[in-house]
């Protein structure tokens, strides 16, 4: 059987993230480990970005009676978030903080450059060529860490004031254009002699050279710099298949399999490129998601000090679903046939994590785009693999993919989901068999959402009971309501339907006309008919805001108050 920690399993992996190995005890940081009296600072050195701890201000708050269980601020019912005791969110709520290093390898991809013309066909045939272009050279540290603090490995979702969200297979499919079907990347760590053999056979080096590199790398891994030198040497000698394998191993080592070493890539990944004509059959998008889930889960614990993984995937996902967050620009030349991640250009400017915490704590439906890929469906349709519910794996690392917890991201009403434990752990053979028969394990009996934020009665109340929706302390009366029907939102389509108006008043007269204008302008923005950052987008947004303000004023005058209304029941 597969051995697990929470929702993660691995066998004999020397590649395991720090503080997540089997049997490792998790200890909360002591006061001496915290830095205080400093402003937030970020240092970039050798592809490692370090976040220094900001001052933490603890606000006075009335202690909530948990009826004998749970934690202040939630979860009050700990049946779902069973590892919350050691989660970073608890540390922050208690007034502590941590310093985290974010390891990015993207600069190394740029250093190696585009593949040689003779190597390019191999890269294209592998299905990995989009990774050569998605180069977020600068990671928005505060933005990324702000979401890491909301990640819970029990559910593999971000827990936000509006409910759960996550990076799904569909997100990977749309953002990266990597395959989310095909075979799992089934490789395991190699012993020393096996590593020597695979280096000599697949990269064409002699035994002495392989042994020197393995000894210098202190394990079944090779340096990324060594691979770059080897690649150039193979190109000079026109050893194209060896050059292609060196390039592809370097590419995945810097992107979808990026680890915390900032220097090495494991030799067992080379096995995936043994047959260059068939490596396209792997589900590279699945591998990218599993590895990122693993890294996010590890980094969500309070005593973890580093974060790795393919962070451009996370960053692009945030840009798409939370358009007001992050410091990015939209490419004017982007076309929908390209991976969605290529829409954005990142710079050196980063978000302050203290600001991101405040922004996420204040998140309402107004700041959301649940399903941002409507205009992209011509290029990447929603496929059945996206709705698969069950285990995914890369080698010995196993993660749950649970789209039933985030159905609003697919345009469906979100009910209270089943417990993650209802998907029982199974061995690798059973996991692989279910993936091959994925049609039998897709989420079904879904209901089309009348509005993008729609959830079943009682969902938000249940979520507040089993989750920790806020990171910072604050008075409950000052929190944005989770059960209010939202007012007109500038980022979501079809929100007119939530207004409490009679059919006659919403479909006729001047009020009906204004509503139709609002709907048309909203669709122009949501479907990217106008490009953000342009004059046309600014004018469209300005007209939409004017129409929304006028509509709200008319609704208020008619006795239907939306803004500021208190819910009849508590969350």
Image (cartoon, grey):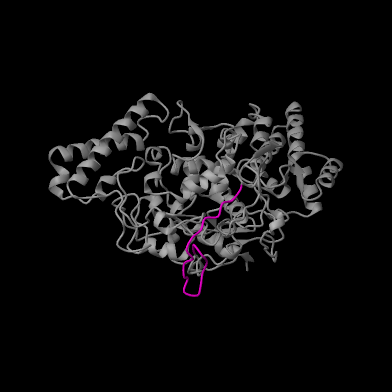
For the residue pair 183 and 89, the one nearer the viewer reads as 89
Report the number of discs: 0
Q: Tell me residue 540's x, y (percent).
A: 32, 30
The magenta stretch spans which residues? 55-74
Q: For the N terminus, which image quadrant?
A: bottom right
Magenta segment main secondary structure? loop
What residue is rendered at 84% in x and 44% in y? Answer: 216
Give the image quarter of residue 153.
bottom right
Q: Residue furthest front?
A: 60
Q: Left or right: where does residue 568 sit relative to residue 324?
A: left
What residue is rendered at 25% in x and 48% in y? Answer: 497
Give the image quarter of residue 531.
top left
For the residue pair 336 and 512, the one nearer the viewer reads as 512
Q: Residue furthest bottom?
A: 68
For the residue pair 450 and 253, the one nearer the viewer reads as 450
Q: Tell me residue 256's x, y (percent).
A: 61, 44
Q: For the C terminus, which image quadrant?
A: bottom left
Give the image quarter of residue 110.
top right
Residue 427 showing in the rendered view: yes
Q: Tell me residue 378's x, y (percent).
A: 38, 38
Magenta stretch holds residue 337? no
372 w.r.t. 20: above or below: above
Q: Tell me residue 155's x, y (percent).
A: 51, 60
What residue is rendered at 13% in x and 41% in y? Answer: 508
């Amino acid at each position: 059987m597969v051995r697990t920690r929470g929702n993660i399993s691995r066998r004999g992996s020397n590649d395991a993230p720090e503080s997540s190995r089997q049997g490792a005890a998790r200890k909360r940081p002591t006061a001496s480990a915290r830095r205080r009296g400093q402003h937030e600072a970020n240092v970039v050195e050798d592809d490692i970005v370090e976040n220094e701890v900001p001052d933490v201000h603890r606000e006075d708050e009335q202690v909530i009676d948990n009826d004998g269980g749970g934690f202040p601020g939630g979860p009050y019912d700990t049946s779902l978030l069973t590892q919350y005791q050691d989660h970073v969110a608890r540390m922050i709520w208690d007034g502590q903080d941590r310093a985290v290093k974010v390891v990015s390898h993207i600069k190394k991809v740029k250093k190696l450059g585009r593949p040689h013309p003779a190597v390019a066909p191999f890269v294209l045939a592998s299905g990995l060529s989009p990774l050569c272009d998605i180069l977020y050279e600068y990671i928005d540290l505060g933005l990324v860490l702000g979401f890491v603090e909301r990640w819970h490995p029990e559910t593999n979702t971000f827990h936000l004031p509006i409910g759960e969200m996550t990076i799904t297979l569909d997100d990977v499919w749309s953002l990266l254009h990597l395959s989310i079907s095909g075979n799992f990347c089934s490789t395991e760590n190699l012993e020393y002699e096996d590593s020597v053999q695979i280096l000599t056979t697949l990269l064409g080096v002699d035994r002495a050279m392989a042994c020197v590199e393995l000894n210098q790398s202190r394990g079944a891994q090779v340096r990324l710099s060594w691979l770059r030198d080897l690649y150039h040497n193979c190109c000079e000698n026109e050893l194209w298949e060896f050059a292609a394998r060196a390039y592809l191993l370097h590419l995945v080592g810097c992107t979808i399999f990026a680890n915390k070493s900032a220097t090495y890539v494991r030799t067992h990944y080379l096995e995936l490129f043994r047959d260059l004509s068939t490596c396209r059959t792997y589900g590279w998008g699945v591998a990218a998601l599993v590895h990122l889930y693993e890294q996010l889960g590890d980094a969500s614990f309070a005593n973890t000090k580093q974060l790795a993984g393919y962070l451009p995937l996370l960053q692009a996902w945030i840009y798409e679903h939370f358009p007001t967050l992050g410091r990015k620009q939209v490419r004017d030349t982007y076309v929908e046939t390209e991976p969605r991640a290529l829409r954005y250009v990142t710079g050196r400017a980063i978000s302050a994590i203290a600001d991101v915490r405040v922004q996420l704590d204040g998140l309402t439906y107004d700041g959301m785009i649940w399903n941002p890929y409507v205009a992209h469906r011509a290029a990447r349709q929603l496929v059945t693999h996206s709705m698969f519910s069950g285990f995914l794996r890369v080698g010995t690392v196993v993660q749950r993919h649970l789209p039933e917890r985030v159905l609003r991201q697919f345009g469906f009403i979100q009910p209270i989901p089943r417990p993650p434990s209802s998907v029982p752990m199974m061995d690798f053979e059973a996991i692989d068999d279910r993936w091959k028969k994925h049609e039998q394990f897709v989420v079904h009996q879904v209901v089309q959402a009348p509005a993008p934020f729609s959830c079943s009665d009682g969902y938000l109340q249940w979520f507040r009971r089993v989750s920790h929706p806020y990171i910072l302390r604050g008075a409950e009366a000052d929190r944005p309501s989770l059960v209010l029907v939202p007012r007109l939102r500038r980022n979501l389509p079809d929100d007119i339907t939530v207004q409490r108006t009679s059919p006659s008043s919403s479909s006729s007269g001047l009020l009906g006309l204004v509503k139709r204008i609002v709907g048309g302008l909203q669709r122009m923005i949501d479907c990217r008919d106008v490009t953000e950052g342009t004059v046309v987008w600014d004018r469209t947004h300005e007209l939409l805001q004017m129409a929304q303000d006028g509509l709200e004023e008319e609704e208020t005058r008619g006795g239907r108050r939306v803004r500021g209304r208190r819910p009849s029941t508590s969350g």
